[in-house]
Image (cartoon, helix red, strand yellow):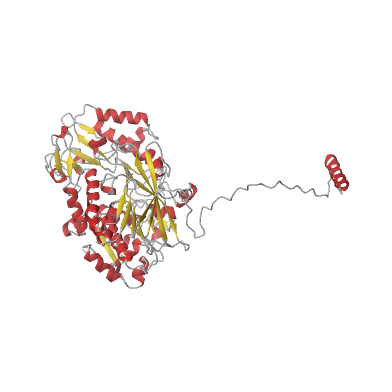
Amino acid sequence: MARRSLRKYLSCLTAFIIGSSCSTQVQVIAPALSNPLPPPPPLILPNGRPNLIPLPTAQEIWKCEVVVIGGSLGGVAAAYHAMQAGTTTCLIELTPWLGGQISSQGVSAIDASRAMWAYQSFASSWRTFKQKIAQQTVTLPEWTGRAIVTVNDVNSCWVSRLCFVPKAGATAAQQHLENVLPKAPKSRWQTQTAFKGATFDDSGQEIVAIHAIQRIPKESNYMPMGRLSQELASWYAWSADDTFEKVPLRLEPPKGKRMIVIDATDTGEFVGWANLPHRLGSEAKTTTGEVNGAQKDNPQCTQAFTYPFVVAIHDDGGKGLAVLEQTLQQYPPFYASHEHEKIFEMEGFPFFEGRSFFNYRRIVSNTRNSPFYSVPVRGDMTMVNWNRGNDWSWMDPPLIYTAEQVKRSGQQQNWLGGISTIALRHGEDHALLFARWLLKTQSKPHLPLSYLMGDEAYMGTQSGLSLVPYIREGRRILGRAAYGDKAFLMREADVRNDQVGGRDFTPTTVAVTHYDVDIHGCRYRNGAPTGEAVTAPAAGFVVRPVQIPLESMIPQEINNLLIGGKSLAVSHIVNAVTRVHTSEWGVGAAAGTTSAWLAKRPDLTPADIVKQGHMTKLQEQMLSQNLRLTW
């Protein structure tokens, strides 16, 4: 046998050399591996949900009936009202401050329409919260000529009836939750904690745990840089680094119970991570049927985001300008300075006199003189959030990751916020360049301008920029079948009194609001068409009292998730109405109250409330917590 095999081998070898063929097959057997490598873990689990890779063992396990992801304004309202009902509630917030728009995002001037002020169509908890902000004490720098004051002592602006330093908003949010804690004493909340994903049941329709990572600064005097583009990865990473220790957390229901989860993040982090049905950016008229819809669907075209900062009337000997120059040299803008600066303008407003730029969001007024007629004085401070200034509307690249970008970047397995650090950097550059432009072009000898940083800016950062940008629009869910829609969303006609086709949401209303259709649009660097809904903006008098129905808060696919912030089932146009402070509080309060109500009825899902005829009872619960369902 051995000779026959050898002859066959030599015959084939000869045939190969002379170029002919050989019919004999030579079988090559690979040596067996003693330790074969295991197959890689699947990216998507059998239940259709993302597989978290890695998923460290939790060092702390929290027991929660309600979990609030995001300590935004809506998140604070959600946690407050869930706790008010006696429900054990857990809240996690990415930044060091609670409050979202009013604190970490730096927009410390309460937006509300004149109509809402006239009718006082506010929830009782919102009025109480604003009073708490007004009562906060603020220690002013020596150069203001004041020492310790209250917000009320220095409040005088014309965009709002309440303007204040952002740090006061953060303190008020903390106190608001502390005050209600005795009603739900096992509740807890933690800042500097990033959402990382969730675990589901076998069906993929029920969340059974939320995973998060808490970061603990190694230095007691730690203050964030105020350059989120550089800090974001560290804030979300599972692993410790030179700045932070890390503590993996698992939030789960108490034994024998289920929990309700609320996505109260401003970008819809849970929605983006789980890839629930949602919309992003502007929608075409043919998509939504809106009269003023965009020319095309453009998921890149979300509203502009903004890094607010603080400017004061103070002679600092040029220090603020010098630091700005140094920063811009150390981190040169990606785009040339002149590209940014050609956008800057006062939009026809005077800078100091009367109804001025400075008085618009003046957060410290030493004399409390009229914001409409008077000139500010030395020691006054203004928070800058200006359309033709620090708004960043360029989509080169866009801020919010699409579903495909999330998937391609691996963030379904290891969530890192689902936003572009390059876009964040552009926004930071733009804000710092606008601050420099203001100091160079608007300062006067008797009214010198200074850019504030660190503790003097009350933004909680070294750079003087807000901890995170003010994000007007993120991912917006598509709801379930309701009000004639197969996938519900609120459309333009639902909020305007000059269009036909608006629907009456009274049967399922959970909050009310009102505002202009105020779209801060998008653009491309090269001026290419954006498809933006350019004809949609409208003044408040054409906007009717807006009813927000429960269906706008219930996503598809998951049975124990609610929206508690900006990620409602609304169109791009309607988002321009519902994105402001008052709306966000109302939505969050409704989500918190609904979650607490469901916690006592474990056989019901949010969708069951309407389908099984429980809406009246839920609305009664909301009215008992002094929420507003009508004007």
What number of labels is visible? Answer: 0
* Quarter of image, res 219: top left
Q: Looking at the rendering, which quadrant does residue 259 occupy?
A: bottom left
310 versus 175 height, above or below:
above
Q: Looking at the image, which residue sits at the far bottom?
A: 613
Q: Pinpoint residue 172: horizontal percent, then vertical percent.
A: 22, 49
**Measured from the top left, where is residue 563 in percent x and y?**
34, 58
Q: With 605 as the anchor, is 113 left or right in this view?
A: left
Judge whether residue 425 can be spotted in this image: no
**Please, is residue 397 above or below residue 181 in the view?**
above
Q: Is residue 441 visible?
A: yes
At horizontal 27% and vertical 42% (from top left) the residue drawn is: 386
Residue furthest out toward the top: 317
**Residue 223 location in percent, x, y?**
30, 37
The spot of residue 147 in percent (x, y) is 14, 37
Answer above or below: position of 509 versus 516.
below
Nearest the viewer among 208 and 626 is 208
Along the line of sight, which residue is nearer the eye, 547 or 498? 547
Residue at image position (33%, 73%) is 613
Residue 561 is left or right of residue 409, and the answer is left
Quadrant placement of the C terminus: bottom left
Foreground of the two, 50 or 534:
50
